[in-house]
Image (tube, rainbow, N blue to C red):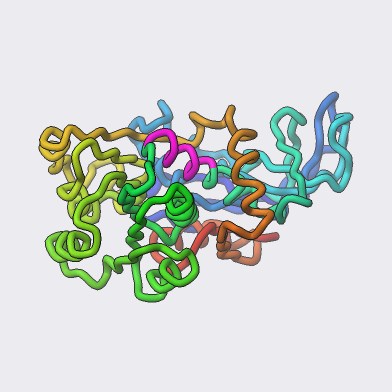
Amino acid sequence: MNRQWIYLRHPDGLVGPEHYELRESPLPEGLAGGEVLVEARYWSVDPYMRINQSKKPTYNELPHALGVVQTAGVVGQVLRSNAPTLQPGDWVEGMLGWQTHALAHHSQLRKLDTQLAPPSTALGVLGMPGRTAWFGLTESGRPKAGDVVIVSGAGGAVGSLVAQFAKRHGCTVLGIAGGAAKCAWLRQTLKLDHAVDYKAHADAGALVAEIKRLVGGVDVYFDNVGGWISDAVIPLVNRRARIVICGAISQYSGGLDEPELGPRWLHHMLYQRATVQGMLARDYLHRMDEMLRIVGPWVKAGEIVFEETVVEGFEQLPMALQSLFTGEHRGKLLVKA
């Protein structure tokens, strides 16, 4: 039997199990030409899932449809194959959704090199988060040696990689994260120059003062959070600064349809002739091999830290998604079969 989490109700605030239903259906009997049957081993849990549930147009014209399997990246193993390029036992990655088994054409799947790194990394450092971090920083942020780079959400799947990539470009890196433990990890494990705990500051003014004390100004701001943290960072941008808008997770649980904060910092873009650019991982999907050629050897050599928070059990998927906005986790959040 195939088990599926069906997305049934639109969340107005925090997403959770009440917006899904667990269903079962028989596995397919046969395979068409080029098809394979995949058994899922890891399911991805990502902030973009909540964006796709917005009632208003986002980067998709329409919201995630109701009554269908929740869209998600999956790593699994081939059970049966009618494709010459894939054999039973092969590890693959694809957008197969929150289900225990999936029937897919081989062209929808990426065969994984398990000699390079563990299969789960195809959903993290060597997958969509890695692609987001690499191209978001290098193409939109355009870092130069000596630049000051600030990363919000620096303890997350994307932010932690952006921070490390910026260090490899010779930048001074300041990471913003929530909690003393995360900040200690940023300094001690990722070797960032500075880490600031936003929870230790009462308001944007206090955060501004601390950032200014540590680095003065900022040349590249990689924003994963938005909200009052961005209100604190953006007035500190230097001349010709580059601001990369990758996410605004502070707005996802109730602020997507009616944002809580307006663009109160646009005048700083004028003063400093700075640029603001949004970026999406999907824009660089065709360059995945390029990113793997560069980042893959670093991962294999142990030169990149990639943390995974792994939740056990398919049944935990909706709560795992909710925990992105309420819980404590570090690095990439995964659910394991």
User: Left or right: 300 with respect to 216?
Assistant: right
User: Between residues 287 and 30, which one lies in front from this camera angle?
Assistant: 287
Q: Residue at x 54, y 57 (%)?
A: 332
* x, y percent for residue 121: 64, 52
Q: Residue at x 73, y 41 (%)?
A: 102
Is residue 110 something that shows in the picture? yes
Q: Is 317 located above or below residue 10 in the figure?
A: below
- Residue 263's quadrant in the figure? top left
User: Between residues 276 and 55, which one lies in front from this camera angle?
Assistant: 276
Q: Is 282 located above or below residue 261 in the figure?
A: above
Q: Quadrant of the C terminus?
A: bottom right
* x, y percent for residue 123: 61, 49
**Magenta stretch prevailing secondary structure:** helix
Q: Does 189 lie within the magenta span?
A: no
Q: Is 96 located above or below residue 317 in the figure?
A: above
User: Between residues 290 and 89, which one lies in front from this camera angle?
Assistant: 290
Q: Residue at x 34, y 40 (%)?
A: 244
User: Left or right: 189 with respect to 144?
Assistant: right
Q: Does 136 lie within the magenta span?
A: yes
**Magenta-highlighted residues:** 131-140
Q: Is 92 located above or below residue 118 in the figure?
A: above
Q: Residue at x 60, y 64 (%)?
A: 310
User: Between residues 105 and 18, which one lies in front from this camera angle?
Assistant: 105
* x, y percent for residue 92: 74, 43
* x, y percent for residue 105: 75, 29
Tally of numbered tags: 0
Is residue 39 something that shows in the picture? no
User: Left or right: 92 with respect to 217?
Assistant: right
